[in-house]
Amino acid sequence: MRAAYIAQFGPPEVIRYGELPTPQPGPSDVLVDVEVSAVNHVDTFVRSGAWRTPVPMPLVVGRDLAGTVAAVGPGAVGFAVGDRVWCNSLGYAGRQGAAAERAVVPVDRLYPLPDGVAAAEAVAVAHPATTAYLALFTHGRLRMGETVVVLGAGGNVGSALVLMAALAGARVIAVAGARSAEDVRRLGAAEFVDYRDPDVTGRIKELAPKGVDMFVDTSARNDLSEAVDVLARRARIVLLSGLTTRPELPAGPLYTKDCSIVGFAISQASIDELAEAAAGLNRLLASGRLRPPAVEPMPLSEAAEAHRLVESGKATGKVVLFTR
């Protein structure tokens, strides 16, 4: 089969495109004919070695896929040949990746793709929307009626945060570029702040004079002074990006307001947490509410260039790789 893979850690140039043996499913695995896979920032961390995780070499890159079941192991109940499916947790922790014509997926990491949902759209939201779900509900403990600030609200994770928080009954203050204002309001944001405003913190305080209950920064800035300054009593800051940031922590205001900071990486999510998030995503996909802001399709053979685009920040949408 054709695959995008690496034989060593390094820059995008280490990605090769060529033939690898077709993987064989074990007793509790499902073999998937991959239609499309996605390229995430975390995939570039694995490829470069910036985030070390046990992986086999050569390693097929990528963690998210959508496709069709080709074969089912005897213990992989719940799926049949021909089922349309998706997965968002390959390519790390000892598992081979998704960027290939065929991939083996453990049955407990595979989810049905709702009828009528395009594979490219599903795979484009798989990682960012799962991240958003975990941030809001698993780690952020969001409750109806709370006020949530989302920085980077126009991006893939940010737009999913806005949608999910608004649907859960939260009041969302979206911080993004001016061109995203209409989009984030359509997703459910109650308020919008242009990130270029010289006093973003002041604007948030005006919109939430009693403070905000949750602060999520998808832009990877992680300015904790700004975040703590706008928090209400017992509010939460959720950290999910900015691998190399080292922000100062205003400890006094944080603890005297009974506030907390929680960080998480989707790669540490448990199987049960991922399954719960997948069920929520599938409901939103089936309803037509959850869609990626933009998709940038590329052939699987251009996986190295796709990694360069994502790593440099020059991608114009969510990069997805088609196998055919």
Image: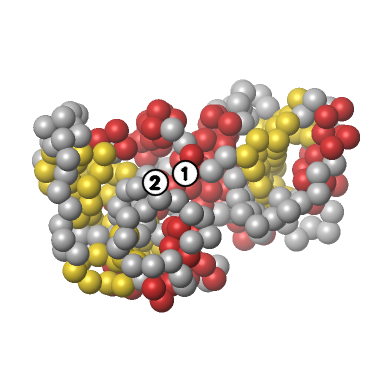
| Amino acid type of the residue tagged 2 in the rendering | Ala
Q: Is residue 134 visible?
A: yes
Q: Position of residue 242 (x, y in %)?
A: 63, 54
The image's mark for residue 267 is: 1
Say which of 299 and 14 sits in front. 14
> What's the residue at 53%, 43% (across, down)?
265
| Left or right, residue 308 beside residue 103 | right
Q: Position of residue 277 (x, y in %)?
A: 43, 33
Q: Position of residue 49 (x, y in %)?
A: 48, 61
Say which of 190 and 232 sits in front. 232
Circle 2 residue: 93
Closer to viewer: mark 1 or mark 2: 2
- Which element carries disc 1, helix, strand or loop? helix
| Amino acid type of the residue tagged 1 in the rendering | Ser
- Which element carries disc 2, helix, strand or loop? loop
> What's the residue at 62%, 39% (across, down)?
263
> What's the residue at 47%, 44% (across, down)?
267
Farthest bottom residue?
A: 13
Q: Residue 258 sits in which quadrant? A: top right
Would you say the residues marked 1 and 2 are in contact, meaning their CB atoms lie under 8 Å apart?
A: yes
| Left or right, residue 139 beside residue 302 | right
Q: Position of residue 227 (x, y in %)?
A: 77, 43
| Left or right, residue 197 beside residue 288 | right
Crowd class of label 1 (few under 14; some 14 to 19; many from 20; radius 10 Å): some
Mark 1 to mark 2 CA distance (whole Å) = 9 Å
What is the tally of numbered marks visible in this picture?
A: 2
Q: Earlier in the sequence, mark 1 or mark 2?
A: 2
Q: Quadrant of the C terminus?
A: bottom left
Q: Residue 114 sits in which quadrant? A: top left
